[in-house]
Amino acid sequence: SGLNCSQMLLGAEFVYPRTKLSSSVPAGSLGPGAPPVPLSGSNLSQSGISVLPTMALVYKPDDSALTLGLGLFTIGGFGVNYPGSPTNPVLSPPPPNGLSVGPVSSNLALAQFAPTAASQLSEHVAIGFAPTFSVADLSVSPATFATPTDDNGDGLATYPSGTNSRLRWGLGFQAGIYVTTDSAWDFGVSVKSPQWFETFEFDAADELGFPRKVALDVDFPLIVSLGTAYRGFERTVFALDLRFIDFNNAEGLGHAAGFDPNGAVTGFGWKSVMSVAAGVQHELNERVSLRMGYLFADNPVPDSATAFNIASSAIYEHALFLGGSAKLTPALTFSLAYYHAFAASISGPFETPLGPIPGAEVRIDQEIDALTAGFHVDF
């Protein structure tokens, strides 16, 4: 309802994360002479550049209080690709040749389809509602959420791989209210329900190669957002957004990080977080607008859960955004933006199904650069 006319948007975000995983184990921490010397090392995730597309359409019929929308968005995800390493203990081979599980890889991509309707209730108040249909593609190896088994009888249990699966679907909804005033202040509130996903099931294999089913239950969290904008200066708009993300009560994500009696990981241990974002837009002229923004977000992963989030780290806290738009024609606008998520790190104990290794540490370091580009057409 806040747009002046009907609009179509096509865009994409190119994300380049750089994540480093390090670990150290003191000499003698596993018993007398084991290991005989301190062990330490680090490895970079070979994640590469990810492409996150966005497509959206908003239609405002003439002389109608109703606005219709249709969007296809990438709403989240993560991924790492760590090689096995004889010198980095947390990526070393399983016992007796090492202390861990070897190479680690993961990929989660979340897309959402949202048909939307909004109604202008009065000159200053509009409300909107959308059912949300989400789809997730998840793979993780090894599947530490599954019980390790010793099918070949060598006395050493191993985890299966969680890579053979189909896309999984989730449902939810979102609703919001948008309020304008005659004093140059605008306000908005939105609530996005959890996205309730069907169980993620994987066609794995045991140590002998026989079929084995493993499963994971995980949902996307509830998100509550509040925002305000001030447009009392000519050609300039200031905006402030507050957001609450309820990771702690999301299925799977908020479960306590640890091992069950059979050696399976019980959860990620993420906590609910708040974020605040501030931005400013200035129109240089009728064709060109410039923007700048800053974001602070709590890190959802506590240090104590570091070892359980090797494959699911999303730990940045501060990010700076720069961008702008240029009208190529009266109807066609091109927008370009860049953001940098500053380096952040977490560190915690080296956890195993038998308990933490005394004096050992696991550390994750991460920073992110991204470029966003898109066209929107007014009609």
Image: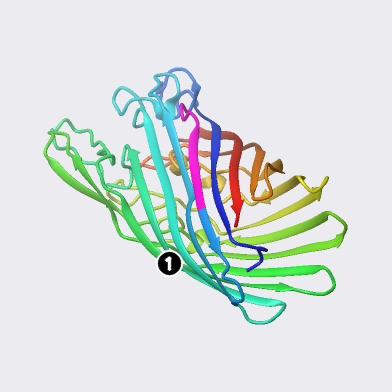
Q: Is residue 295 left or right of residue 30?
A: right
Task: Give percent across and percent down for residue 199.
Answer: 29, 57
- Amino acid type shown at disc 1: Gly
Q: Residues within 10 Å of mark 1 (few under 14, many from 20)?
A: some
Residue at left 65%, top 43%? 335
Which quadrant of the figure contains the N terminus? bottom right
| Chain part drawn in magenta | 45-55
Q: Secondary structure at mark 1?
A: strand
Residue at left 16%, top 30%? 154
Q: Is residue 56 above or below residue 40?
A: below
Residue 48 magenta-highlighted: yes
Residue at left 49%, top 42%? 52
Give the camera-side residue of 83 and 280: 280
Q: How many marks?
A: 1
Does residue 360 appear in this view? no
Q: Is residue 252 above or below residue 68?
A: above
Task: Give percent across and percent down for residue 354.
Answer: 35, 41
